[in-house]
Structure formats: structure tokens, C-alpha cells
Amino acid sequence: MSHINCKGTLIDLSSPKVMGILNITPDSFYDGGKYKDISIAVSQVEKMLLEGATFIDIGAYSSRPNASHIGEDEELQRILPIVKTLVEEFPEILISIDTFRSKVAKECITSGACMINDISGGSMDPMLFSTVAELQVPYILMHMRGTPQNMQNNTHYDNLVKDIIFYFSEKVQQLRALQVNDIILDVGFGFGKSLEQNYELLQNLHLFKALELPILAGLSRKSMLYKLLDITPKEALNATTVANTIAIFNGASILRVHDVKEAIETIKIVEASRN
């Protein structure tokens, strides 16, 4: 499946696309608090769109390990004004909403967003799958164990890749039964995985192509990169580019990144080497 339908626009994923990250959380691991002001958020989105981002992924709930939990109302208060402003400023924009809550998903899609990116795979809100089905929008299905508050407490797997493929196949079956058409898989780098397991997943990303769905790689400036190299997230752009290169060679169709320009350059070089 190489196309997804976003607001009536068919997006061709046979050539990898870039999803720019806009965190409007005060405590995200890399850019927390930077884009709370709407005008700063708008100029950052404009920059990412000019650099070539196909999608903009907006999150108002921090999902880093041990992040503080916030309520639904607070998440909505943070995210809705930004979504509405961006749709007004950039009518063609394709906004993905990083949420696990059906109410947040519904209100944002109604306000002009076009995709749901759910870290919980439907496990933190039993209404989410049926809401996605009702809204008929593309859905990013991520693998995580537990919640952001406790996900790093259980990183034992019988067989890492097989366990996650089994998890995906069960969830995809549930989504298909509800007539959800466009599903994108995200193995969840850093979510309930040890450092070594993250690299095992990166090396074996191509095995997930057996599920015949597009794969999103979210590696940007993550701890699997900066902890390995003993640097900070701010110093992890070069590491991100290397990891993204491996991900594309192993079948990733979407790169979710903080740095759009560099991700676009990575894709161009990989594509040129393939041609």
C-alpha cells in the first residue's frame, strides 16, 4: 500500500516523506516550551513546510519517559488554538495529531487536521479505534508497552521483532474490522525498549514490510542516539541523519523529525543512490 488519503489528497509513499514535529508541550525532551506561543509555532511550521515537510505532527501531551500526565481538557486547550490557526494560515497543510484520546482526535480533525498519530495503539482510550473509523482518517499505529510513565519498566520480550509483528497484526485486524483504510506502522523507538533493542529494531525494520503497510520511523534526536554517543539531544542531529538513512534503506516511508531540511537531503541522497 503506497498511497494514503489525507483530506481527499492522495499522498504517494513510494518515495519517502517527511513529517515535521511541532511539540507544544512545556516538557518535551528536546524542544519543550519552545513553541507554546502561537506566533512562534506558526513561523516554525512555515519554515518546516518551506523545507519540504509533507506532514506536520502536533503534540500537546509529552510522551517522553516519566513525563507528567495531563488531563484531556489541558491537552485540548494547548492543541486546538494551534490547529485552528495553522489551518487558517496554511489551508493546504496536512496536520497529524499526536494523541491517544478520542475526544482530542475528533475535535482536532473537525478543526482541519487529517491524521491521528497514537503512541498507545488504542490501548489508552477504548474509543479511539472507533473514532478513527468514524472520522475515516489515516492512523499511525505505534507499539508501546504500558504508558509513558512506566513504559521503561518492562523491556523483556520473548522475541522482540516477532512480538511486535504479532502486536501489529492483532491491532491491524481490529482496525480493518472497523473499516479503517489507511494504517501506518511505527515500531516505537524508545518506547518500552532498551538501547540494544532499539538498534535491533532499526536493523530489522525491513521485516515489518511483511505486513504490507507503510512504516514511519521516529528516531529524531532520541536517547538511543545521544546516550550511545554520550552527547545531548541538541548535539544529535548528525546521529539522527545516520539513523534516518538506515531506516530508509530498511523500508521506512515516513521520517518523523525535528529537522526537516536535513531529512529531505537524506531522502534525496538515498533515492539518488538507488537510481
Image (cartoon, rainbow, N blue to C red):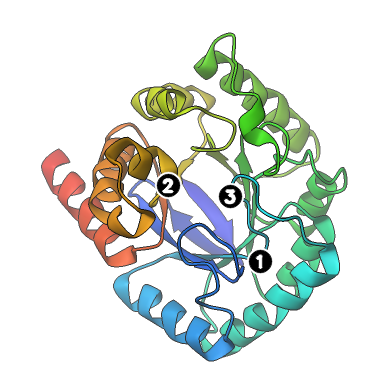
Instruction: Please give the residue where the numbered disc 2 appears in the rendered image.
Output: 222
Is 41 on the left or on the right of 206, as rendered? right
Residue 161 or 30: which is nearer the viewer?
30
Instruction: Please give the residue where the numbered disc 3 appears in the rendered image.
Output: 64
Q: Secondary structure at mark 1?
A: loop
Of all residues shown, which one is farthest toward the top? 158
Q: Please, is residue 209 above or below residue 96 in the view?
A: above
User: Could you tell me if the residues under marks 2 and 1 are in contact, i.e. CB atoms within 8 Å?
Assistant: no
Q: Residues within 10 Å of mark 3 (few under 14, many from 20)?
A: some
Q: Secondary structure at mark 2?
A: loop
Q: Residue at x 52, y 35 (%)?
A: 213
Q: Quadrant of residue 141?
A: top right
Amino acid type shown at disc 3: Arg
Q: Quadrant of residue 84?
A: bottom right
Q: Residue at x 53, y 17 (%)?
A: 160
Q: Secondary structure at mark 3?
A: loop
Q: Please provide percent x and percent y for residue 199.
A: 37, 27
Q: Quadrant of the C terminus?
A: top left
Q: Residue at x 66, y 35 (%)?
A: 151
Instruction: Please give the residue where the numbered disc 1 appears in the rendered image.
Output: 60
Is 1 on the left or on the right of 250, as rendered? right
Q: Residue at x 70, y 56 (%)?
A: 99
Q: Nearer the viewer, mark 3 or mark 1?
A: 3
